[in-house]
Amino acid sequence: MTFHVWEALRPVKRPGGLVVAGQARTIATSGAHSLIIDNTGHVWSCGGLIDYPGLLGRVVSPGSEYGVNLGRIEELDNVVAVAAAWGDDDPLGLGVLSLFLKSDGTVYVCGCSDVGQTGIAGAEIYPSILLGQIPGLSDIVAIATSGMHSLFLKSDGTVLACGYNRNGQCGGASNYGPNLVVTPQPIDFPWDVSGSDLKEVKIAAISAGNKHSLFLGTNGKTYSCGINEYGQLAKPAASNWGSFNSYPGPTYLSPAYENYVGSSGLTKALSADIFNSLFLMEDGTAWAAGDNAYGQCGLVDTNLFSEVSLVSELSGVQAVESGSGASFFILSDGSVSSAGDHYDNQLGHNGANFSLAEVPGKVVEVSSNNYVTLFRTEDGKVWSCGQNGQGQLGRAAANGSLPGEVVLA
């Protein structure tokens, strides 16, 4: 579910250079709404839910919060990254959130606020908030959210978290009642022991699933915390599906993970979904952990869930994206192979698992969530497919549409 850093130590993109009207720099979708950063550092938003009027980060006409056309957020500039998510946790219900990272390392937020996911103290008493800056955050280089909890990576390799924490997905103790972290708190990682050396772990990439979190260290090791009922933490899952098997603090994915994927080199990138996790290795292989109900882990038997398994159909993978029962793999030629739930053609094709998405040009980024997928190609164009009941595709299209171009204008 993501809301993602695509590769370890990815440099933050700063607005500047050649500015070409209508080109996109990065993308994010929650499934209910979508965010696109253009080449000037401004953000365009579309979609929305009527219960969360602040979700799009801009003023819309009263009563029109549901199904808003693509428009620019005038209050923000110099934005270098966005994150959007639509989380769900029974009995709390939905959590829909937008995060915006600016070039100066500050973070802005809007949307659902009732479990502390905005990081603004006092906002938890309201169902949602309008666009505002998160106090106390600086030197942030990456952001991620599940809609129910949020993660912030600082330039020094430390991580802060806030939001719903019933399953330990915030990586530490709650600071408001039994299950909430209402202001960003630092996550403590286990020390890295290499021979006789003891080193402090620094984090290079983060990803937030619905009830779990993944972290990639600068040492190439992967850490996880949160719920593990389907094995999505790449640790042994509970003996029966749906039971609570949570890890409240980040732990290194050993020994099973290392035994399986160690021959593939260090982990290069990762992505967390509702019940799944994807891992990209240095040798271009992809590995999956968690629920395989739609074949999204690459296993033939959809009744199985996996602690961690090789996606054997693919090689030469450059980037991974996990989104609500679907998996996406950008290959070395810029094509995208996808598998999993295709209820609304959100895989970008209507063929068998691991067919190629029908996107013209070389794809450099994918964002997928809740039956909606966005693709960004190297020429700065954005293509969208899937469900469009709220206008979240950013274009006039019926539900279940295959990829079509989104025009920033």
Image (cartoon, rainbow, N blue to C red):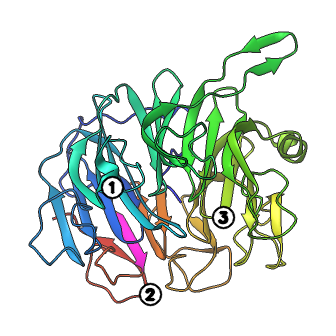
Of badges 1 and 2, nearer the viewer stands 2
Mark 3, residue position: 275
User: Residue 409's x, y, as percent?
Assistant: 15, 65
What residue span does the magenta drawing correspond to? 382-386
Mark 1, residue position: 380
Of badges 2 and 3, nearer the viewer stands 3
Q: Is residue 59 left or right of residue 12?
A: left
Magenta region includes residue 107: no
Q: In what element is the residue under mark 3? A: loop
Real-space Cα distance between discs 1 and 3? 31 Å
Mark 2, residue position: 400
Magenta region includes residue 383: yes
Real-space Cα distance between discs 1 and 2? 24 Å
Question: Residue 32 occupies which quadrant of the picture?
Answer: bottom left
Instruction: Assign the magenta stretch its main secondary structure.
Output: strand
Q: Is residue 10 left or right of residue 258?
A: left
Which residue is more in the foreground, 385 or 381? 385
User: Residue 142's x, y, as percent?
Assistant: 44, 38
Of badges 1 and 3, nearer the viewer stands 3
Badge 2 vs badge 3, beta-carbon distance below 8 Å: no
In the image, residue 304 above or below residue 221:
below
